[in-house]
Image: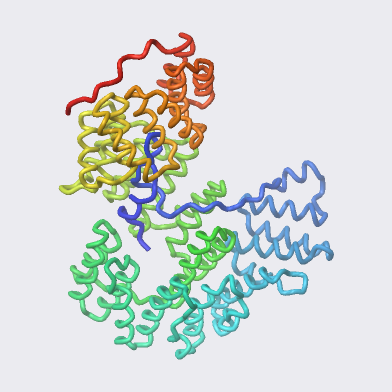
């Protein structure tokens, strides 16, 4: 599942500007919050409680080891704890199983899957799923099919059970069962991925016409996405139909012209290079776990989502999108070491490599190590990939190297640039102090995307703050607020427009709403202080300005606010700004 520029442009934020959540490059796979148990390490436990030989001491040591990424040691501690306390054996055994599973030690997890009367039904069901995957991974596939039945895995894991069952049947030699398309009523995930899996299994059974029928169904819609297009194109290449493969790749590229996986596949077919291999059974079974993992993420079932990803990687350790998702979950949980280890798994040349390197670089940026982040981004960009160049531009902007960021974006702009690239370069020029170029890029972006609220807000606020084109800018930020009424930044832009136009009463009302939405934003609090001063609420104005100084403002804002506080207020109000005739 390639991570491409078109997808990444929709998801991330540029960290250098409070005014706008600028969509460009960054984290393509949504981050999920994973509850991490904070517990003392085994060393800390030993210092506080000498001799961690009690079941509870061993339990805490196991938690510490698990939190440090030492899964084998964690499982051993939990095993010892369970053996030493019969009263808590069920709870400790479940925790040991869960520790092994979530850390990726699937053989150990399968061996200790709880089955006794003291174990919860939920853990038993997850244990049976784990045992099924381990059977498939370790050459005992005939054990898997009964473990994947609905009554074995239960309602929660029904998607996984349904999607994996045909692959388990194929591994077990049950060709008839392998070709049964999985179905769950009103489940679009099973409908789509079940059909995709059936197409691959039809091909393995040499039932090529039926495989192609499935592929045509999957790719027959206007924007099918890259997964079915790549699968169908690979099938056509293996059948010696390279011209047809190129045509289907071109259809995918019409919707996603920068998709590196599709570009690579088309180039391969056009050069008559060797066709990609058919999907291996373990690879297909692993793929069947990815979509349910994403569904669990969306439902905030984080433990099950991570469990599915670990199981997928047991079947196919080269499943790069699974490594990226694991990395995202580990980073969200605060385990940077584990996150970086996951991001390091995709190899150079793979479709996911640039995205993995971008995530790796951003993990250092988020930790305050901008130098390492930029070094990684520069190394990736040196290979010339568009995604890598955009990531470098993002990180340069995040590190306030605005001019260089604009230069990098200029290299990837192309004759018909994406509006988001124009938007990003416009911001970079603006922050570098070149408003003429910045304004030109922002206006060009607005022509291509006239209704985007972020762009309307950024350009509108920029004019408002400069006292330019105020009537037009007011209309732009009003439209932006209409689209995102819960955005503190956009409501602030509207309030500041009223302020610039001299309508201080309406400015106060609007800016008070903005502060309620974004209470910790120094710029918004500063604007409200100014508006309070203009309507005669002097004490409240001074309070707001002093509050700004507690919110870590940038040096420029800090100096301006300190000057206002020292002077005891603002000078007399100038006449309302006149609309610039431009």
Asked if residue 35 can be seen in this view, the reply is yes
Residue 307: percent from the left, percent from the top?
57, 64
- Residue drawn where x is 40% and y is 34% of the image: 18
Nearer the observer, 197 or 372: 197
Image quadrant holding the N terminus, namely bottom left
Q: Is residue 400 above or below residue 271?
A: above
- Residue drawn where x is 32% and y is 65% of the image: 225
Nearer the observer, 497 or 245: 497
Residue 574: percent from the left, percent from the top?
32, 14
Q: Quadrant of residue 573?
A: top left
Residue 29: percent from the left, percent from the top?
43, 55
Q: Quadrant of residue 47?
A: top right
The residue furthest top is 567
Q: Is residue 309 above or below residue 175?
A: above
Task: Count how many numbered circles sit on residues in the image.
Answer: 0
Q: In the figure, is residue 262 to the left or right of 302?
A: left
Image quadrant holding the C terminus, namely top left
Residue 189: percent from the left, percent from the top?
45, 71
Q: In the figure, is residue 306 to the left or right of 263?
A: right
Q: Is residue 268 above or below residue 136?
A: above
Nearer the observer, 511 or 279: 511
Asked if residue 375 can be seen in this view, the reply is no
- Residue drawn where x is 74% and y is 51% of the image: 60
């Amino acid at each position: 599942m390639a991570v491409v520029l078109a997808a990444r442009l929709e998801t991330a934020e540029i960290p250098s500007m409070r005014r706008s959540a600028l969509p460009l490059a960054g984290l393509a796979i949504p981050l999920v919050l994973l509850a991490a148990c904070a517990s003392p390490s085994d060393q800390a436990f030993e210092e506080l409680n000498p001799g961690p030989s009690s079941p509870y001491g061993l339990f805490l040591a196991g938690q510490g080891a698990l939190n440090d990424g030492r899964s084998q040691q964690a499982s051993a501690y939990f095993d010892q704890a369970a053996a030493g306390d019969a009263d808590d054996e069920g709870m400790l055994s479940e925790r040991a199983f869960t520790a092994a599973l979530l850390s990726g030690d699937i053989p150990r997890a399968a061996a200790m899957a709880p089955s006794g009367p003291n174990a919860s039904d939920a853990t038993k069901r997850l244990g049976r799923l784990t045992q099924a995957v381990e059977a498939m991974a370790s050459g005992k596939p005939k054990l898997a099919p009964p473990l994947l039945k609905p009554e074995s895995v239960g309602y929660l894991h029904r998607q996984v059970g349904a999607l994996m069952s045909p692959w388990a049947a194929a591994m077990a030699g049950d060709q008839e069962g392998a070709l049964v398309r999985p179905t769950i009523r009103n489940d679009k995930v099973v409908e789509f991925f079940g059909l995709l899996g059936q197409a691959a299994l039809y091909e393995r059974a040499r039932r090529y016409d039926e495989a192609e029928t499935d592929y045509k169904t999957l790719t027959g819609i206007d924007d099918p996405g890259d997964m079915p297009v790549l699968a169908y194109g690979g099938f056509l290449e293996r059948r010696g139909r390279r011209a047809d493969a190129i045509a289907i790749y071109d259809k995918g590229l019409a919707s996603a012209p920068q998709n590196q996986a599709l570009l690579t596949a088309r180039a391969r077919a056009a050069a008559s290079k060797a066709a990609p291999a058919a999907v291996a059974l373990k690879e297909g079974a692993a793929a069947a776990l990815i979509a349910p993992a994403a569904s669990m993420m969306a439902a905030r079932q984080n433990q099950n989502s991570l469990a599915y990803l670990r199981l997928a990687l047991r079947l196919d350790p080269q499943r790069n999108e699974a490594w990226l998702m694991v990395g995202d979950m580990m980073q969200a949980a605060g385990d940077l070491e584990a996150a970086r280890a996951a991001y390091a798994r995709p190899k150079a040349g793979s479709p996911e490599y640039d995205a993995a390197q971008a995530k790796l670089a951003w993990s250092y940026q988020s930790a305050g190590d901008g130098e390492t982040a930029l070094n990684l981004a520069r190394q990736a960009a040196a290979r010339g990939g568009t995604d890598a160049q955009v990531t470098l531009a993002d990180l340069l902007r995040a590190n306030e190297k605005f001019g260089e960021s604009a230069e990098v974006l200029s290299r990837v702009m192309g004759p018909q640039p994406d509006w988001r690239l124009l938007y990003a370069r416009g911001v970079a020029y603006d922050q570098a102090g070149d408003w003429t170029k910045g304004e030109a890029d922002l206006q060009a972006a607005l022509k291509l995307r006239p209704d985007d609220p972020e762009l309307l807000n950024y350009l509108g606020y920029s004019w408002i703050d400069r006292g330019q084109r105020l009537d037009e800018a007011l209309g732009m930020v009003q439209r932006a607020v209409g689209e995102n009424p819960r955005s503190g930044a956009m409501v602030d832009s509207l309030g500041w427009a009223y302020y610039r136009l001299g309508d201080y009463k309406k400015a106060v009302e609007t800016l008070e709403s903005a502060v309620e939405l974004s209470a910790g934003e120094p710029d918004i609090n500063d604007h409200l202080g100014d508006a309070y001063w203009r309507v005669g609420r002097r004490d409240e104005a001074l309070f707001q300005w002093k509050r700004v100084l507690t919110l870590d403002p940038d040096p420029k804002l800090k100096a301006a606010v300190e000057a206002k506080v020292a002077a005891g207020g603002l000078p007399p109000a100038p006449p309302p700004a006149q609309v610039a005739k431009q």
